[in-house]
């Protein structure tokens, strides 16, 4: 595995409809490489008991948040239930330059905003598809967490999410969890080797050129 000293980090986007197995796959990915960390979002809502600024969220005033959006300091943002949420660009950019991978669990709209940002060249986007709609429904029911009404809403929203699968770099059908987890790791490992992610290559090639010229 390449080390942080020899590469730039990745901005890894994982998206899927609810119930496709994204959370489990994320856990497998971070167990494989614990240095992969989640992006800490910013929000204008008030902190809940036990939440720490900079750990759970970056808690901002609405004016501060809107100013950051206007200045291009939010990679993506949305207005949800009366509050703003977004992903500050500064910490992610610093992590990428330090060779650290940052993981985003966001929907297609957030992914689209990031792909239009200045960090797009370092972005890896992956969409997780369920093997079937019937299986997606079964997984949501088997969780035992939601009412039938909530499950129906999740199912209704799932097709909107699935319809944007074609805008992602990679698409995995999660019909076999272990195989899908291995494929996810393979994609991340291979993308880390992209030429753009290896800034030390230029110096290495210059060294090869110098050696070659010395032979002349």
Image: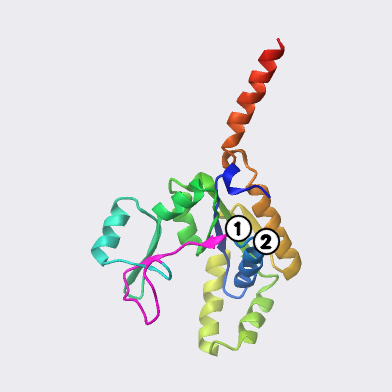
Q: Is residue 24 above or below residue 148?
A: above
SS for tag 2? Answer: strand
Badge 2 local density, few (<14 within 10 Å), some, or many (20+)? some
Residue 82 found in image quarter: bottom left
Magenta residues, dominant SS class: loop
Q: Is residue 151 above or below residue 10?
A: below
Identify the residue at horizontal 62%, vertical 69% (top origin).
27
Left-right relation of 21 to 101: right
Residue topped by disc 2: 172
Identify the residue at horizontal 53%, vertical 90% (top origin).
147
- Is residue 109 among the parts visible in the rendering? yes
**Residue situated furthest top in the rendering:** 216
Left-right relation of 192 to 154: right
Q: Is residue 91 above or below residue 45?
A: above
Residue 172, how many percent across, how many down? Answer: 67, 61
Image: magenta residue range: 36-54
Residue topped by disc 1: 126
């Amino acid at each position: 595995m390449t080390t942080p000293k020899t590469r730039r980090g990745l901005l890894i986007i994982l998206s899927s409809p609810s119930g496709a197995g994204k959370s489990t796959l994320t856990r497998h990915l971070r167990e494989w490489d614990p240095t992969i960390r989640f992006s800490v979002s910013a929000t204008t809502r008030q902190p809940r008991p036990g939440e720490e600024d900079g750990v759970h969220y970056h808690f901002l005033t609405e004016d501060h948040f809107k100013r950051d959006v206007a200045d291009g300091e939010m990679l993506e943002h949305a207005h949800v239930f009366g509050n703003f949420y977004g992903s500050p660009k500064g910490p992610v950019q610093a992590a990428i330059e330090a060779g650290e991978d940052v993981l985003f669990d966001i929907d297609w709209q957030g992914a689209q905003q990031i792909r239009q940002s200045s960090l797009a060249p370092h972005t890896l986007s992956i969409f997780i598809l369920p093997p079937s709609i019937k299986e997606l429904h079964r997984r949501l029911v088997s969780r035992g967490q939601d009412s039938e009404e909530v499950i129906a809403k999740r199912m209704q929203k799932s097709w909107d999410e699935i319809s944007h699968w074609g805008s992602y770099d990679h698409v995995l059908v999660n019909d076999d969890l272990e195989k899908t987890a291995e494929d996810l790791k393979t994609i991340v490992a291979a993308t880390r080797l992209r030429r753009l992610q290896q800034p030390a290559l230029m110096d290495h090639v210059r060294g090869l050129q110098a050696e070659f010229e010395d032979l002349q």
